[in-house]
Image (cartoon, rainbow, N blue to C red):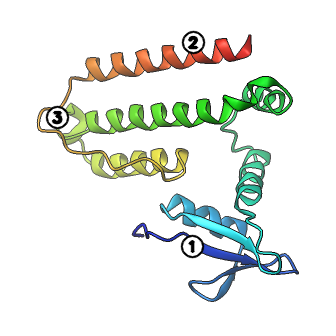
Amino acid sequence: MAIKSQPLLIKRYASRRLYNTETSDYVTLEDIAAFIRDGREVQIVDLKSGDDLTRQYLLQIIAEHESRGESVLPVDVLTDLVRSYTSQSMSVVPQFLAQSFDMLRDGQTKIMENIGSTNPLASMPGFEAMQAQQQAFMKAMTGGMMPSAPKSAEPETSDEGLDDIKAELAALQEKLSKLGK
């Protein structure tokens, strides 16, 4: 699905039903999650008050996935997030999380660049399907925010990409340890 410039507007009625204004039908949380995985931005507003409810519904989608055993967030991270709401570190947490996800997307982009035609596995039957599945997984893990991997004129060797990822991971771990103090 093509990414549109305007977010998909979902209206919540008093009955708590969610209405897709683009297709004029009711949607579920799972439908909204699918829109997001497909790269769409969504905005959920209360029909009566006009309040933006997007954040609370996105959190609800995450909570439902976590409760079904589709755990992405380790308990330690969840605990630290709860703590951040009552500590002075609250002001740095949103910025830190945004930068962390940027680093994750950049690392995943580098991985996807390295899983290309220069890979010896590329000649293996079914490799293209496996690569497409991996890209879909990466896109789902980042909420559709991962840019398409650009084709570089000269691909890095896998060791260089791995070193970059290790360095980014080490920097992320250092920031996490500083936040915990």
Residue 32, image quadrant: bottom right
Compared with 24, 66 (above or below) is above
Going from N to C along the chain, the mark reached first, 2 or 1, is 1
Q: Residue at x 70, y 39 (%)?
A: 71
Residue 110 in the image, given as x and y percentages of width and height: 33, 33
Q: Nearer the viewer, mark 3 or mark 1?
A: 1
Compared with 23, 5 (above or below) is above
Query: What numbered label is drawn on residue 176?
Result: none
Q: Nearer the viewer, mark 2 or mark 3?
A: 2
Q: Nearer the viewer, residue 181 or 62?
A: 181
Going from N to C along the chain, the mark reached first, 3 or 1, is 1
**Callout 2: SS:** helix
Going from N to C along the chain, the mark reached first, 2 or 3, is 3
Residue 92, image quadrant: top right
- The Cα–Cα distance between marks 2 and 3, rounded to whole angstroms, is 33 Å
Image quadrant in which the C terminus is located: top right
On screen, residue 180 versus residue 96, left or right, reads: right
Q: Nearer the viewer, residue 140 or 9?
A: 9
On screen, residue 139 versus residue 148, left or right, reads: right
Compared with 92, 112 (above or below) is below
Residue at image mark 3: 118
Residue type for callout 3: Thr
On screen, residue 81 versus residue 138, left or right, reads: right
